[in-house]
Image (spheres, rainbow, N blue to C red):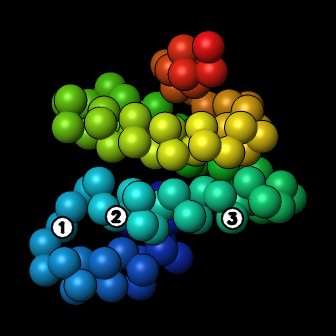
Amino acid sequence: LLCFPHLKKLILKEIEVSQEIHLQTIFCNVFFPYLLKLLDDINFANRRKLIVAGVLLEFMLNLDNDIQKVVTTVLERLSDEPEKFKLFSQFAGKQTKRFIEEMSQ
């Protein structure tokens, strides 16, 4: 929420529907579509948001396995859209880029 406060309503709606907080669900149902939207229109404001998204995913890759699986799921879903996958790699951190390169092979 701190990185993307404008997603708060959507996240709270996801929690309300499921009655629990599932990071995987929030990232797949809220963050991932938002990421796609940003990648559809790369303007100055969206570039800044994509940089923050890249930093967030990089940070998450350094946490425990359950959180790493969330990042993996987001990147796997993004890989279904090769152009956006490649575009996002410009905003990704070192570990995330390595992961993206492995998935692209």
Give the answer, above or below, for where 12 lies relative to 57.
below
- Are the residues at dot 2 and dot 1 in contact (C-beta closer than 8 Å)? yes
* Percent of width and height locating residue 96: 52, 25
* Percent of width and height locating residue 84: 72, 44
- Residue 67 seen anywhere in this rendered image of the structure: yes
Instruction: Name the residue at the right extreme.
Output: 43
* Percent of width and height locating residue 7: 48, 74
How many angstroms separate mark 1 from mark 3 (CA)? 23 Å
Q: What type is the residue that disc 1 sits on?
A: Ile
- Quadrant hosting residue 98: top right
> Looking at this view, is 93 or 38 the one in front?
38
Please indicate whether residue 50 sits to the left or right of residue 54 in the image: right
**Which quadrant is home to the N terminus?**
bottom left
Give the answer, above or below, for where 9 lies relative to 79.
below
Q: Which residue is mark 3?
A: 37
**Which quadrant is home to the C terminus?**
top right
Helix, strand or loop at label 1? It is loop
How many angstroms separate mark 2 from mark 3 (CA)? 16 Å
How many angstroms separate mark 2 from mark 1 (CA)? 8 Å
Q: What type is the residue that disc 3 sits on?
A: Lys
- Quadrant hosting residue 61: top left
Q: What type is the residue that disc 2 sits on?
A: Ile
Give the mark, 1 or 3, whose residue is nearer the N terminus: 1
Q: Which residue is mark 1?
A: 21
User: Which numbered dot is residue 2?
Assistant: none
